[in-house]
Image (tube, rainbow, N blue to C red):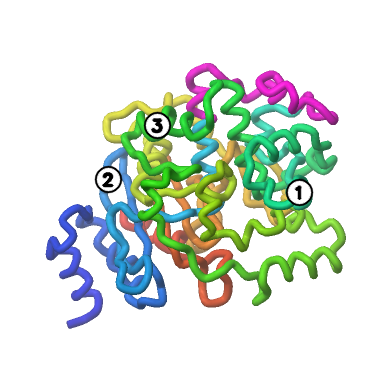
Amino acid sequence: MTAARAERDTIDSGKETSMIVDPRFIPLAIKFFRVFRSRRAGGGALAVFLRGRPVLDIWAGDIGPGNPWRRDTMAMSYSTGKGVAATVIHRLVDRGLIDYEQPVAAYWPEFGSAGKGSITVRELLNHRAGLHRERGLVPGNGFFDHDTVAAALAASSPDPRRLRLQGYHTVSFGTLIAELAQRVTNMPFPEIVQTELSEPLGEADFWFRVPREERARIAPLFPAVRVAGFDYENFAAAAGRYRRGNALVESIPAGLVGSQNHPSVHDAVQPGWNGVFTARALAKMYGALANAGEVEGIEYLRPGTVEHIAEMRPNSRYDYVLGVSPHHWLGYHRALLRGGPTSSGFGHYGTGGSGGMAFPASGLSIAFVTNHLGSRLTAVGDLRLPTFASIACRLL
């Protein structure tokens, strides 16, 4: 029996009765299951919505030795959370609580110090606030504390390059977005997420501070994030010596990368990097963004708001932090397919390979989460999600 036939029989056998596989997406399911045939590949989940309805919801592989990935398993997904946090802001815009064109300081007065009084909400979402630097911003492990980091960012002077270029707010984006939302609603950000995402979408698994009773469902991440074969802090030290003022190194606090499985990560509210999700929850959120704001009969956002997001207007020809231009717009970047970025969709990718995307022209959304970071070459990222998304788009 061929591998493809065996995998197809697994899909059809009903062994996991709560899995969803629309017949049109069987080739995508087969590709996904092949990725996780090896125990060394860890585990993961993949979900797809089409025109506001679920058409694929599958999982495979292991959380750890003898511990299979289950329907309710979830994983920390790094920058995937930036798209989730941005969606919260769009909900608040939709409700008339925030205006993209207003200065951030109109909602968060302390933010206006050090020459930042004119920076708008739109510029903040577009990574044009010039507040990328977090390395050395607060002492020790203070980067775990939202209030400490938010106050330090509010007191910081913006990088002058922001007037000409985008500068990816690698870690600080989440703190800035969360504090803006808190100032507007007078609620803690985890409660805002519950009110603006979990409750209206009927999906609980959007976590930036994970309740202790839910933590057994989190799949530990592996391997450790390394760059060019080096421990990240050794790489950062070398980059600091040979490339003075390296903006990407400046944007990541010392000690953050090595903390990926430390329990304190899940006590923190850091939406730029510590979001914990299921693929199902992400795909449903992006399903609304792909379907004029509606998913499973729920009007989540007004069509006009989604149309404005989907415009993905040019923001910057270059990103002074990343060294490339991923074309960020209102908290998302252009969707990534196997051949590279495409203007037909948007979403957010995370270090290690997780992420979610929306394709409004077809009504398709897709999300992938995994505990196995990256490829054989690097844990920073790989082509699993872009490959899955390319297959999904071709199947329509």
Q: Amino acid at mark 2?
A: Pro
Badge 2 vs badge 3, beta-carbon distance below 8 Å: no
Estimate how packed mark 3 is, as few (under 14), some (14 to 19) or many (20 or more) residues with alpha carbons within 10 Å.
Answer: many
Q: Which mark is residue 54?
A: 2
Q: Amino acid at mark 1?
A: Pro
Q: CA distance from mark 1 to mark 3?
A: 44 Å
Image: magenta residue range: 89-118
Residue at point 73%, 70% (across, down): 234
Between 130 and 264, the one lying in front of the other is 264
Residue at point 31%, 38% (across, down): 52
Foreground: disc 2 or disc 3: 2
13 left or right, relative to 79:
left
In the picture of the structure, the residue carrying the numbered disc 1 is: 139
Q: Amino acid at mark 3?
A: Ala
Q: Which mark is residue 292?
A: 3
86 left or right, relative to 237:
left
Instruction: Please report whichever mark, 1 or 3, sits nearer to the chain's N-terminal start.
Output: 1
Between 227 and 311, the one lying in front of the other is 227
Spot occupied by residue 85 in the image (x, y as percentages of width and height): 53, 38
Q: Quadrant of residue 226?
A: bottom right
Q: Quadrant of the N terminus?
A: bottom left
Residue at point 77%, 25% (across, down): 112
Q: Quadrant of residue 128?
A: top right
Spot occupied by residue 332 in the image (x, y as percentages of width and height): 56, 43
